[in-house]
Amino acid sequence: MEKITSFTIDHIKLQPGLYVSRKDKVGEQTVTTFDLRLTKPNEEPVMNTAEVHTIEHLAATFLRNEPAWKDKVLYFGPMGCRTGFYLLLAGDYESRQVLSLVRDCFGFIADYDGEIPGASAKDCGNYLDMNLPMARYWGRRYGELLKNIPENRLVYPE
């Protein structure tokens, strides 16, 4: 079998950043997948499932309600390795074009104080596995990186 795209990235060189992971054609439409990398793979501790789950609920809610982007958001969810998230958008984009969207999203997470959207037995299959304080920590940490992100953290390392 062919190695899938995400396994061809050199995770030893990979730093936290905002990367275009892949672009796929679906009919005439391009779907851009972004790698929102929050931790340095294989060097920093990974995020725990409770904060990953909380970030997923908050980010998905923010993105699907953001007026300029909500109709382009196809998916937001965690990487299995728990070092980041994938954001899939309808359209052909580069990292710089979505930087303010992602920055605003993680600012929303960093500042969020209230009931976590969808955190109920009726709305979620694992609603008790949530950690808002740690989700806010990751929101602040990633948000700080995105404020002055260097160009080399917007394109995968070669």
Image (spheres, grey):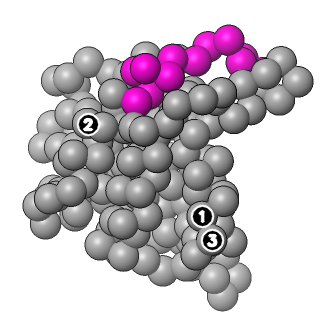
Q: Which residues are magenta?
A: 125-136
The Cα atoms of the two marked residues, 1 and 3, are separated by 4 Å
* Direction from residue 116 to residue 49 in the image, left or right: left
From the image, tell me which residue sits under label 2: 141
Residue at the extreme right of the image, as rendered: 122
Tell me whether the residue at label 2 lies in contact with that at label 1, contact meaning CB atoms closer than 8 angstroms: no
Secondary element type, mark 2: helix
Residue at x-position 39% and y-position 38%: 110
* Direction from residue 91 to residue 9 in the image, left or right: left
Amino acid residing under circle 3: Pro
Residue 130 is one of the magenta-drawn residues? yes
Instruction: Give above or below for 90 relative to 144.
Output: below
Residue at the extreme front of the image, as rendered: 113
From the image, tell me which residue sits under label 1: 66
Toward which corner of the image does residue 129 lie, by quadrant?
top right
Q: Position of residue 101 (x, y in %)?
A: 43, 64
Q: Position of residue 10 (x, y in %)?
A: 21, 45
Residue at x-position 88% and y-position 24%: 122
- N-terminal of the pair, mark 2 or mark 3, is 3
Secondary element type, mark 3: loop
Residue 21, can we see it? no
Query: For the C terminus, which image quadrant?
Result: bottom left
* Direction from residue 149 to residue 77 in the image, left or right: right
From the image, tell me which residue sits under label 3: 67
The Cα atoms of the two marked residues, 2 and 1, are separated by 22 Å
Toward which corner of the image does residue 134 lie, by quadrant?
top left
Amino acid residing under circle 1: Glu
Residue at x-position 24% and y-position 54%: 146
The Cα atoms of the two marked residues, 2 and 3, are separated by 25 Å
